[in-house]
Amino acid sequence: MKHTILTTAILLVTLTLPAFAATSKMSSSKSGSSRSSSKAKTEMAETISAKQQVAQQLAKDLTTTQESKLLTFLNEATVEELAEIKGISTRRGAAIEKARPYGSVDEVILIAGIGEGTFSELVKHGKTLTRSRSGSKSSKKS
């Protein structure tokens, strides 16, 4: 009987000790977690800022009209329309749709999976939004 009680006690200690150790680590790190959390937020803000700066540089090639039309496109296009752009899958298109509304075109670079290359493709698409849809073929004389 003593052996059974002792075995049960050892088993309980063995099972609860890791949980207790994890809890004590969490409570001891709480004082430092606010500092590390603050540092992580600062680093994240710097990363976001750096990504947006890259996007702003790429978007400088757009005219005001092109930028306005691209912003409208980002805020209103369907997932299928977004997926027609090179580098944007339906999954990324859905992420773009979910993060709406955008106040500026450079905000879209903050979406997971949208990097400099994909954003560059969006800028290329933005440049096409103001091109005349009537081709030179219709102006040819017979």
Image (tube, rainbow, N blue to C red):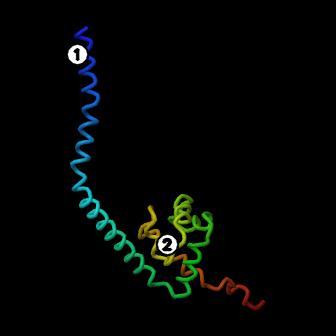
Badge 2 amino acid: Glu
**Residue 42 percent coordinates (x, y):** 29, 68
Task: Determine whether 30 is above or below 132 in the image.
Answer: above
Residue wearing tag 1: 6
**Residue 35 percent coordinates (x, y):** 24, 61
Looking at the image, do the residues carrying marks 1 and 2 touch, with CB atoms under 8 Å apart? no
Q: Secondary structure at mark 1?
A: helix
- The quarter of the picture where the N terminus appears is top left
Residue wearing tag 2: 121
Q: Which of marks 2 and 1 precedes in the sequence?
A: 1
Q: Secondary structure at mark 2?
A: helix
Q: Residue at x 49, y 77 (%)?
A: 105
Task: Determine whether 2 is above or below 95 in the image.
Answer: above
Relative horizontal placement of residue 14, taking residue 54 as reference (left or right): left
Mark seen at residue 54 = none
Cα distance in 3D space between marks 1 and 2: 69 Å
Hey, which quadrant is residue 58 in on the image?
Answer: bottom left
- The quarter of the picture where the C terminus appears is bottom right
